[in-house]
Image (spheres, helix red, strand yellow):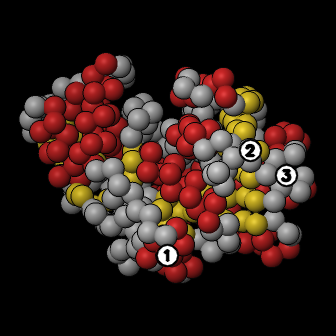
Amino acid sequence: MSFWTNKKVVVTGGAGFIGSHLVEELVKDGAKVKVADNIERGKKENLESVINDIDFVEIDLRNLDNCREICRGMDVIFNLAAKVTGIEYNRSHQADMFESNMLLQQYPIQAAALEGVPRFMQVSTACIYPHDAKVPTPESEGDRGGPEPTNAGYGWGKRMGEKLARWYAQETSMEIGIVRPFNAYGPRDYYDTATSHVVPALIKKVMDGMNPVEVWGSGNQKRVFVHAQDFAAGLKLLGEKYAKPEPVNLGHDDMVSMKELLARIQDLTDSHNPPFFNTDMPEGYPERAADTTKLKEVTGGFVPAISLEEGLKEMIEWYRLNPIPD
């Protein structure tokens, strides 16, 4: 029998890109899942495969009473509720990113404590790390300096959420885990031009025939990308095995430059318009990759398994069937 069998679990933000994959994982393992989402960015269609097996609540979690309502009588909360956008929106809306993400961390954890929920998993971000973090980045780097400046509002909001989680773990009986995921991509990602991340943004530009293909920054900046299904599997495993207020990276260290990422997308789409590297636009961290030593230790060896090529093929095929206008 699975650890999750008959567990009453809330996934906040569960209609979103990552949350919906986690919901599917939990349902598969026998959990009784409640999804709480305001459908501001998530989509109920993301839950189509499990909609008859879950309790779906459309609700605004920037309200303590609403959070208490969804936490009441539950065993585990996965707090994926967040305002997540692309680098340009982050850079130009720092106050909004800080305030929105603080509310979406403060109220769910407070409500869970007030309602006596035994276990709470706080989903943070690799954006809490400083611009000059060691690469691959160990969790200890999150305790120095400040978040990378282009993501400062989001990064500080999430870093303060981690602090709050640690204090609740000290001052209540609730078991609390903190997960720091690295760049996610994959099915159900967002392709809107204003707020999308780099993988869907480049796929859209290439497949829409942009000529030249604009790439923000020099193209030399490097990232690791974690497939949404790996992300969900890792979250579920950490929720079972490591509900401790000591952050754990969820990622890997196989970096790819934005130049190489574009080349791979073009090869897979047989489209080879020349690139234009727009150095007037932000590029964020020069390099970002996860030190996975702790992740492997606390999960018994888990690391993301789906290759970037597999994930890109999946996203390209989806966009081929579902092109999105600007």
- Which residue is pictured at 67% across the width and 66% down the height? 243
Q: Earlier in the sequence, mark 3 or mark 1?
A: 3
**Structural crowding at the residue carrying mark 2, measured as other residues with C-alpha within 10 Å and reported as few (<14), some (14–19) or many (≥20):** some
- Three-letter code, disc 1: Glu
| Near-viewer residue (76 or 16) | 76
Would residue 320 appear left or right of 111 to someone viewing this image? left
Name the spot of residue 289 as percent of width and height, x first. Answer: 36, 67
Residue 270: x and y in percent read 10, 31
Q: CA distance from mark 3 to mark 2?
A: 22 Å
Q: Secondary structure under badge 3?
A: helix
Residue 141 pos. (x, y %): 49, 78
Q: Nearer the viewer, mark 1 or mark 2?
A: 2
Instruction: Please state which amino acid type lies under the numbered disc 2.
Output: Asn
Q: For the residues labelled 3 and 2, say whether their Cβ atoms are less than 8 Å apart.
A: no
User: Disc 3 versus disc 1: distance between alpha carbons?
Assistant: 31 Å
Per the image, the residue denoted by label 2 is 6
Tell me the tag on residue 111: 3
On screen, residue 325 versus residue 46, left or right, reads: left
Q: Is residue 152 visible?
A: no
> 295 or 190, which is in the foreground?
295
Q: Quadrant of residue 51?
A: top right
Mark nearer the N terminus (1 vs 2): 2
